[in-house]
Amino acid sequence: MVSGSTFQGGLFSDDVLGKRAGATLRLGAYGIEAETLHGQSFSLPYDECQLEVGGASGRMVFCHGPHRTLTLFCEDPAFLPALAHAGHGRLLGQVTRLTQDARRERTQSLLRGLLALLVLVLVGYGAYRGFAYATSHSVEALPIAIDEQVGKLAMESMPLEGPKVTDPVLVQAVDELVSRLKPHAGGTPMTFEVTIVDAPIVNAYCLPGGKIVLFTGLLKAAKAPEQVAGVLAHEMAHATLRHGIKRIANSLGLIAGVNLLLGDTSGLVAVAVELAQHGLLTSHDREQETASDVEAVRMMAAAGLAPTALADFFALLEKDGAEVPGAIAWLASHPQLADRQQEIRQRSEKLGAFQPRALTQDWEQVSRHAKQPGLQDSKP
């Protein structure tokens, strides 16, 4: 759309009978021009225009003048995109913000709907099995597709703390580790997808359905690929053990589920807010962390990788934490590491000997690229 486009809409003004009238809106070179059915003309310069989206449908675009003495409005879906290009893009910033807000609201609405469905399924299945321990049993009965949908929506709505990394050296290195571990993941098969984010954060987390976020800060801190594999195995275990969905279910509880059926959505909204802040999906209790550690040990050994590598990484951060950027924050958010290291080593010993299979990665190269994604290696 360019200047000169016309749309059917209306206006609010004290200068028209009844203070409201239908009008034809035209996007001029310097402003929006409006003409009522009775021939009255109005003009609103782009530089004085304040945009808002709302109305009963939630899709009405309002263009407010100074002090709102004149307001033009239009519900045509093409009107807002046209405003972005009118007047040499004077309203582009406002249009972009409104578009992003609308996209975020749609994502949150989908998430609320999906959570409502999850609650309904949990409550229905819980009624069949009885209220005692119904939540945990209900989660186990849900299809993995629920996890994947929740993970997808959460991934779309949450900030990543940094830009996504497409450096082929880093992507291929992580893909090799996931490919080695995936055949040995327990539970229902799922697709694991790792997003590498360039940020000085020594951490990784997994959303329901197998979507993993791995920060370059962790790749820089690790001294060997097996240590990163141990972290990935731990995060994959959170997905296969369905810890994220269980956290949602436990936070909702059956009472909130019943209240939802009766029309009270306050519990659902509260959980949705927490979910948007990632507390329910990326923060796990001690029991879940231990379960993921144990499963990671099994997966690592089955994949021919040192099952103690995760404990080695914990020990590295405890020893050199002050010298590793971001490690102090990681240590603070992962208490009782000494106990977890001991548990991992004991579990590894119980497994006995395993058949090691070496990785093919040049970890020095990976470390260089983790420090500077996109680095061009000099030719030999």
Image (spheres, grey):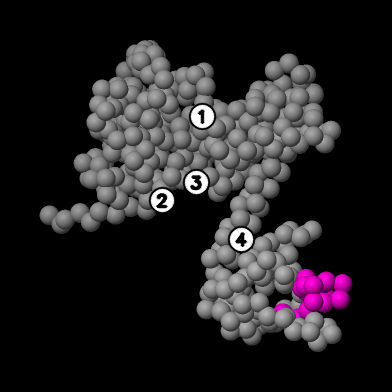
Pointer 2 local density, CA inside 10 Å: few below 14, some 14–19, many at least 20 = some
Q: Nearer the viewer, mark 3 or mark 2?
A: 3
Q: Residues in magenta?
A: 10-25
Between residue 66 and residue 224, name the one nearer to us.
66
Q: Is residue 184 magenta?
A: no
Residue bearing the label numbered 3 = 159
Task: Point out the residue furthest to the right here.
Answer: 18
Could you tell me if the residues under marks 3 and 1 are in contact, i.e. CB atoms within 8 Å?
A: no
Q: Position of residue 211 (x, y in %)?
A: 50, 41
Residue bearing the label numbered 4 = 98
Q: Which structural element holds mark 2?
A: loop
Residue bearing the label numbered 1 = 283
Q: Quadrant of the N terminus?
A: bottom right
Rounded to the nearest whole Å, what is the CA distance between mark 1 and mark 4? 32 Å
> Does residue 298 appear in this view?
no
Q: Position of residue 241 (x, y in %)?
A: 54, 27
Q: Quadrant of the C terminus?
A: bottom left
The amino acid marked with disc number 1 is Ser
